[in-house]
Amino acid sequence: TSDIKEPPQNQLGKRTMPLESSNDENNGHIARNIRLALLAMDVVEPYVSIRTVEDIKLDDDVVPAVNLRRYDGKSHRELSPTVWVPHTLPKTTISWTVGGSFEIDETEILVGPWDLLPSSLADVKDGLYPSTDMIESLVRSEFTTVSASNVNMKQGIMGTSRWHKDGPAPRSRQGDQDDENWFGPYPSFTAEIDTSHYPEGTSLVVLARAKVDKSWLTQRANVGPPGLGSLSHIVNGRNNPNYFAANAGKVIRGKRDNWWYSNPVTVMVGSSADEEDLLDESNEYHAPSNVDTERHVRAIHINARMASMPSAMEKMHDEELPKATEKMHDEE
């Protein structure tokens, strides 16, 4: 951030709050270069993450350099956070965030029955997520899309990231310090999905997805020759579905539909008759739950890390197994 290789010491800044941009003496070249390096690493690839279901906080599933989608040979369904909601709950609130970008052009929630997706959501050859089979399955009529309800469209975009000159938008709920701490410097999108019309025992897959940085495709007046188009990996990788580049075993491939998908979350639609037993078990295992003032359960995270509820998970498996067997017979 300096035109000279060895700027004077009084321009280097101080150790205080190096990640906070300001105009005071603390914001010197060192702090600015630290933030610039973090920005460059973060925007290499966009990412989307579901952060809460009915105000129950989910573990961050975006971990650099770790491919959780192929962890220990388990499927996406086995690894997904599973939240139980009663059939009587009319709407289930989902919150998510988008990172690794500057402008968020579109973002929405997808919800539908797990059984309509392929057993593997990643490509069987190269492990890239999502697979072509998964994308083709999502266009079925049984899958519903729900747009974020808390956006204020500006200049044709739905939101901005932490790296945008205007800062992240939309922000988490104003005045809710716990919510603000959970989302940190990231935008917070919210939508409500209708889970009440699904039969009891249905396992729903919930995905968040986003399209980002479309404005990068617009060629500036001072760039030529006209019509050349973008040449960089970072632009083509997120906006050119036909793009492919490989070097030294590393692959950059454009998204087939230009959407970036979150890891899935499972929402289990259950019977209100099971509420008391599930609540007792959640208290026993300290599982995260959302219970209203009249002790009615709104949601329980039944497989939370370090707080998994064995009886609830076994019951879910027992209810899903007959459906899976019936589906196999139907396919035959």
Image: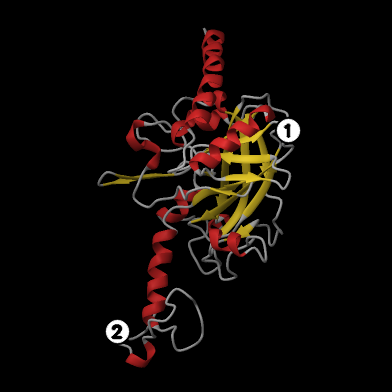
Evaluate whether residue 263 shows in this view.
no
Q: Is mark 1 on a helix, strand or loop?
A: loop
Q: Where 280 falls versus 190 (above or below)?
A: above
226 displayed left or right of 10 = right
Name the image quarter holding residue 280: top right
Mark 1 vs 2, N-terminal side? 2
Where residue 33 appears, x then y in whole percent?
A: 38, 75
Q: Which residue is drawn at 46% across and 25% down?
A: 119
Spatial separation of the CA atoms under disc 1 and disc 2: 65 Å
Evaluate whether residue 28 shows in this view.
yes
Q: Which residue is drawn at 45% across and 44% down?
A: 254
Q: Mark 2 points at which residue?
A: 5
- What amino acid is at disc 1? Thr
Name the image quarter holding residue 187: bottom right
Q: Where 67 falls versus 271 (above or below)?
A: below
Name the image quarter holding residue 296: top right
Q: Residue 88 carries which label?
A: 1
- What amino acid is at disc 2? Lys
Where residue 32 appears, x then y in whole percent?
A: 42, 77
